[in-house]
Image: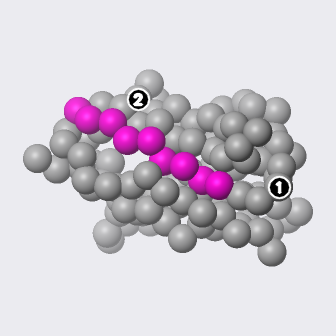
């Protein structure tokens, strides 16, 4: 079993920035795809961004140009840099690791964009 630990959520004003972190033990992020998802109240969980083991990235249309996913292989951490945040970005953000046919989820971190 792999435990993912997320951090970095919080309250930010519209137009502000946050950086989310997802940490895992070992060098697992070097070998498996990782993605960030979010779920707002009353909505289904949706994919925000993903990064493959080779570093290829993919983004939802709604965050393209504002969010950046990256990984630090030394720190075994995947980041989601979120800029130009909008109230519509308010949600719980989850990190997901696709590991040996299993989807491993983090506990989630709340992001609230409000003035």
Q: Earlier in the sequence, mark 2 or mark 1?
A: 1
In x, y percent, where is residue 70? 62, 35
Furthest residue to the bottom?
A: 1
Q: How many marks?
A: 2
Viewer-closest of 70 and 65:
70
Magenta-colored stretch includes residue 41: no
On the question of residue 34 being in view, the answer is: yes
Span shown in magenta: 15-23
Q: Is 95 left, or right, of 67 in this rendering? A: right
On the question of residue 63 being in view, the answer is: no
For marks 2 and 1, give the one nearer the viewer: 1
Please determine whether, in this image, residue 82 is positioned above or below residue 103: above
Circle 1 residue:
26
Viewer-closest of 62 and 108:
108
Quarter occupied by the N terminus = bottom right
Viewer-closest of 38 and 8:
8
């Amino acid at each position: 079993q792999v435990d993912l630990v997320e951090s970095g959520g919080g309250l930010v004003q519209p137009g502000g920035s946050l950086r989310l972190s997802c940490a895992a033990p070992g060098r697992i992020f070097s070998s498996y795809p990782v993605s960030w998802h979010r779920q707002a109240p009353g909505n289904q969980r949706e994919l925000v961004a993903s990064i493959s083991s080779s570093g290829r990235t993919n983004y939802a249309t709604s965050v393209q140009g504002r969010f950046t996913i990256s990984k630090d292989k030394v720190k075994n951490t995947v980041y989601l840099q979120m800029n130009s945040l909008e109230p519509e970005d308010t949600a719980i953000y989850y990190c997901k690791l696709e590991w040996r046919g299993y989807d491993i989820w983090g506990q989630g971190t709340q992001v609230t964009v409000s003035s």
